[in-house]
Structures are given as C-alpha cells and as structure tokens.
C-alpha cells in the first residue's frame, strides 16, 4: 500500500510546480505594469516595483482610444450574443423537436461550421463584407458568427431532453408552438444558454485576426485588436511598462469574472469542445 | 403552414451560414482557379495554375514544414501534460479549485495578451527567461529573433495557453469512467500503474482522440501569436499557414494564390479529420 501522506505531498508538489509555471508569467507582467519605466532595465530581476505607480495606466488612456475600443468590444460581444441567442434557439428547437424533409442533411451542413477554420474563409468573407459596404464596421466583425453551429448543437441536446408528454400537455392547454418554446423550453435550457453565452463572449472578447482583417480605423476596432495594434506602434513597442499596463487593462474584467465564477466558466468550456 | 414551420425556424441560421460559411468555402475553391492580383486586376481563369505555383514555391513547402513542426512540437507535450495534470487534479486534493483556476486561466485571456506577456518574458537582456537563463550559465538569447528558437518560443506559448483547456476536457472524460471498474481492479490486486494502463487510458481514448483532433486544428489555425510575436520571421522560420495566406491576400493582394493556399489548408484539415475518424472506428474503445 502506498503511503498516503507522501502521495498527497507529491500531488501537491507537482500541481504547485505546474501552477507556478502558468501563473508566474502573468504575475510578472502585472507587476511590471506598476513599475516606473526605467526600473525594468535593471540587470537583476526586481519583482516588486520600487516606486509603485499608476502612470502607465494613464499613459495607455492617452496613447490609444481605450474606451472607444472597450465600447466597441461590448457592442460586438453582447450584440452578437443577442442575435445568436435568437438564431440558435429557433434552429435548435426545429432540429430537436420537429420532423421535416432534409433534416439530417441540413444538420450536417450546419456542422460544417465546426469543422472549418474560420480563418480559412477570411478572404472570401472580406470580399463579401466589402461588397455589402460594411468594411470597418462593428457589424462586419459580428457577421460571420451570427449563426452558431456550436450553440445550436448545444441547445439541441437540451431541447431533446424535454419529455414529449410535457409538450403534448402544454399544447392541450393552448401553449403550443412558439409559446411552448418561450415559456417552457427556453427556461428549462438556462444552463445551456449560460454555457454558450460565456464561451461566445470570451471568444469574441479575445478575437484578433478577423477584426484585424476587417477594420481599418479605430472606429470599429475591439480591445484585443487595439492592444495588438498598440504593440506595433513605436510608442507601444518602446515602452514595456505601458504595454504591460495595456495588457492588464484588456484582460482585467474577464479575468476577474473568471476568478469569481470559476466553476461556471470551466463547466461551460468543458461543453464547448470546439470553441465559439 | 405547418410544413413550412421548421424551415422558418432554421431560416435565419441557414441564411447567415450560407453567406458566411458555405458560400465562402465554395468561392475559395472557385477563386483559386483564377489569377487575380495587383498585376492582373481583372480575374483571369488559369485552371490549377495557382496550385502549380504553390507546388513549385519553396516558401510554400517551408510554411507547410513549419506548421507540421509547430504541431509536432505542441501537441504531444500539451496532451501529455494535460493528461497528467487532469489525473493529479482528479485526486480531489485540498485546494483543488485554486490549482484548477491557476492552470485554466490562460484559456480565458486573448492569445494576443498571451503574446504580449511572452514578448516581455522572452525579451533579450531584461526578460525573465534570460535573467534566470544567465544565472544558470546560458548565453543571452534573442529567442524570437533566432532562426531555431523562434518557432520553439511559439510552441512554448501555444502549450502554455492551451494546456489548461485540454486538462479540463480530460477531466470531464475521467469523471465518466465508472468507479466500480477501479474497485473491481483493486480487489483483483491491480497496481495503480496497471489501473492506469488497463482502465483509465483505454476508457479515456475517445476523449484523447477528440482533444488530439482539436489540437491539430488549433495548430493549423495559429495566427495571432505569429502576427504579434514574429511576423513569420526570422527568415520565414515561423511563417505558418494562416499567416502565409494573410500575407498573400492582404499584403501582396494576390487573392487567387491566397485562395489556393486556403483551399489546400481546408483539404489538409478535412483529410486529417477523416483519417482520424477512421482510426477512431478501429482503435478507440467506447465506455
């Protein structure tokens, strides 16, 4: 028999080691963000800022249209989620509880979205967006994701689990069709909706490549893209403390939400598998 | 009316899906048959000309090789680490939630932020890695400017960013393995090592398979970190598929050629998925 205390200690030791490797890089940049600009050029690592300062954060607000990016990101992430909730609810309901000609083929055509890299259709989607006159708009950033195979798939599973008898009983009471969907099916699927919402919001908060392709000015740009663009400017590339402050400002809110609602986030991502 | 109802329900989804997913896939293959660039602004049909061009371009082969190296460097290590961490977390130790959060949080942050973090950590002279590297007697290395280490640095970032996510998927797989199998094995006197190889690993194989496919697709989608950390350099040593497509489409405006490369990427991923599913049917045990 294995000695249990020793085994526990080993488990803790290994997890602690792995955890440190993952956490320390973030800790290092978080501390850097509070340092004075010259302090980082010392030849011995100074972990704690000698003179903690908020100067870098104010600098970021001056150097890039941070609040504009923030607003754009909120509009894109939540606006998109709003549309997705409608499209996935209707489609998932049809696929889960209705019989119709061509259903299985259509379902496979839906799943195609999960199998392709969204980046590989970026060129043609760029051409489409230009033709629609939507270049450099927030709507363009949302457009390729308005339908979600992942969301539809997730909800379909939930809707399938609702007993047939419940629907029949509701129908007899005059609560059929869309009313059944709105008053019975949707409330029963709240956990599925939450999981989808967290994954979708995170994915679109973080997205970089498509917004990069489809925007030209800060008019529609989102935070993550703004951070990347800032890093490529002379100012951003030359000033590590300011760049780290900007990074911290971009991730702060999602990260805090994650720390508070850890279990919910992780469960949602467990279900996500194939991403947003 | 009743017949049309389901179609009305799926209409919004399929409208968007057609415009932004199905049509672009078909159009990518269509465009790939044309010469369409700055020198030829009016599209000209050239058949498989763009594919022939890719075949005879050394850079195309280098990009393919880079991407394969990137996948081979990232996937086995991430998967092995993720599995070990999932097994450790699954021991239900005290402080589990803290460990899990610490390992998972890189999933929540943007790859662009991860790129910023590692740019600073890997920076020459003042970066954390070089600080402690020098303490161990290593030379001061310009990781991202080095022809051999730059890709390794991207691999490192890829592992760091994804290992927690894969761990959580493994964890989900571990939790559905029936407890009574272990109990029976313990009664039969099986060692923990035997239990792992005879029960855990075989019953986990659908999950492993799933994570592996996801990881392959991930590795062929990598672009943010390439764009932000190396721009494909030095000397195209970190130029990966999507970045190569991006360069050709949006920097050189060679839309026809970029479409052909997109088409090839699409076929590679499709081929890998089909291959993987065949293996699944032959090898994987179902719980």
Image (cartoon, coloured by chain):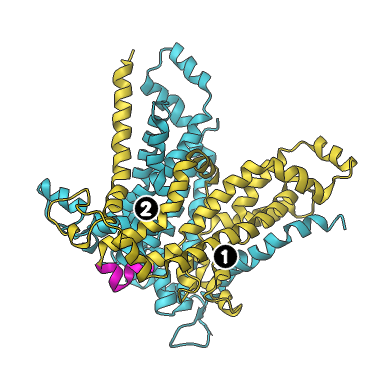
- Indicate which label's residue lies in the foreground, 2 or 1: 1
Is disc 2 placed on a helix, strand or loop? helix
Residue A239, image quadrant:
bottom left
The image's mark for residue A96 is: none
Is disc 1 placed on a helix, strand or loop? helix
Q: Is residue B80 above or below residue A100?
A: above
The residue carrying mark 1 is A142
**Residue A128 in the image, given as x and y percentages of width and height:** 58, 75
- Marked residue chain, label 2: B
**Residue A253 in the image, given as x and y percentages of width and height:** 45, 52
Q: Is residue A179 above or below residue B10?
A: above
* Viewer-closest of A214 and B25: A214
Q: Is residue A187 left or right of residue B271?
A: right
The quadrant the C terminus of chain B occupies is top right
Magenta segment: does it hold A232? yes
**Residue A40 in the image, given as x and y percentages of width and height:** 19, 58
- What color does chain B have in the rendering? cyan
**Magenta part of the chain:** A229-238
Measured in 3D between alpha carbons, the distance from the residue under mark 2 to the one under mark 1, in whole angstroms, is: 29 Å
Do we see residue A77 in this rendering?
yes
User: Which chain is yellow in the rendering?
Assistant: A
Instruction: Give the residue at x 47% y 60%.
Output: A207
The residue carrying mark 2 is B71
Dominant secondary structure, magenta: helix
Please rate how many residues cluster around mark 2, counting C-alpha atoms within 10 Å: few if below 14, some from 14 to 19, many from 20: many
Q: Is residue A253 above or below residue B231?
A: above
Q: Is residue B41 left or right of residue A28?
A: right
**Residue B242 in the image, given as x and y percentages of width and height:** 42, 65
Instruction: Give the residue at x 71% y 46%.
Output: A186
Instruction: Give the residue at x 51% y 41%.
Output: A270
Q: Is residue A97 left or right of residue A176?
A: left
Do we see residue B261 in this rendering?
no
């Amino acid at each position: 028999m294995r000695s249990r205390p020793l085994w526990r200690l080993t488990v803790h030791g290994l997890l602690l080691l792995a955890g440190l490797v993952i956490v320390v890089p973030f800790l290092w940049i978080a501390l850097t963000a509070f340092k004075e600009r010259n302090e980082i050029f010392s030849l011995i690592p100074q972990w704690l800022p000698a003179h903690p300062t908020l100067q870098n954060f104010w600098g970021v607000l001056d150097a890039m249209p941070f609040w504009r990016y923030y607003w754009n990101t909120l509009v894109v992430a939540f606006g998109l989620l709003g549309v997705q909730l409608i499209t996935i609810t209707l489609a998932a309901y049809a696929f889960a509880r209705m019989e119709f000609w061509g259903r299985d083929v259509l379902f496979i055509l839906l799943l195609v979205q999960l199998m392709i890299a969204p980046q590989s259709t970026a060129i043609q989607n760029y051409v489409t967006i230009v033709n629609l006159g939507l270049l450099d708009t927030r709507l363009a950033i949302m457009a390729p994701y308005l339908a979600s195979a992942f969301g539809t798939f997730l909800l379909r599973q939930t809707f399938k689990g609702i007993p047939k008898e419940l629907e029949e009983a509701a129908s007899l009471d005059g609560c059929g069709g869309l009313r059944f969907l709105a008053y019975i099916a949707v409330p029963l699927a709240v956990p599925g909706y939450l999981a989808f919402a967290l994954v979708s919001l995170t994915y679109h908060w973080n997205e970089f490549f498509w917004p990069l392709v489809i925007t030209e000015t800060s008019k529609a740009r989102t935070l993550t893209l703004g951070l990347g663009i800032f890093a490529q400017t002379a100012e951003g590339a030359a000033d590590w403390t300011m760049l780290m402050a900007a990074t911290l400002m971009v991730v702060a809110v999602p990260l805090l939400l994650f720390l508070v609602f850890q279990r919910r986030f992780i469960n949602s991502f467990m279900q996500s598998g194939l991403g947003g | 009316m009743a017949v049309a109802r389901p179609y009305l329900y799926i209409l919004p989804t399929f409208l968007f899906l057609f415009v932004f997913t199905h049509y672009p896939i078909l159009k990518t293959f269509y465009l790939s048959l044309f010469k369409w660039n700055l020198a030829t602004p009016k599209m000209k049909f050239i058949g498989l000309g763009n594919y022939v061009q890719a075949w005879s371009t050394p850079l195309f082969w280098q990009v393919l090789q880079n991407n394969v190296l990137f996948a081979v460097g990232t996937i086995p290590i991430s998967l092995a680490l993720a599995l070990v961490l999932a097994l450790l977390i699954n021991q239900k130790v005290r402080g589990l939630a803290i460990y899990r959060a610490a390992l998972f949080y890189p999933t929540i942050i943007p790859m662009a932020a991860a790129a910023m973090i590692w740019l600073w950590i890997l920076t020459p002279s003042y970066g954390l890695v070089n600080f402690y590297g020098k303490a161990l007697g290593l030379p001061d290395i310009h990781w991202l400017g080095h022809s051999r280490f730059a890709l390794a640095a991207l691999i490192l970032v890829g592992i760091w960013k994804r290992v927690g996510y894969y761990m959580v998927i493994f964890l989900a797989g571990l939790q559905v393995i029936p407890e009574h199998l272990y109990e029976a094995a313990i009664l039969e006197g099986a060692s923990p090592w035997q239990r792992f190889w005879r029960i855990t690993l075989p019953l986990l194989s659908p999950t492993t398979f799933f994570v592996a496919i996801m990881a392959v697709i991930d590795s062929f989608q990598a672009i943010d970190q390439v764009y932000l950390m190396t721009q494909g350099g030095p000397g195209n040593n970190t130029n990966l598929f999507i970045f190569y497509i991006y360069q050709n489409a949006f920097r050189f405006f060679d839309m026809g050629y970029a479409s052909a490369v997109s088409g090839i990427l699409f076929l590679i991923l499709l081929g890998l998925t089909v291959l993987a599913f065949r293996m699944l049917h032959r090898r994987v045990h179902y719980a």
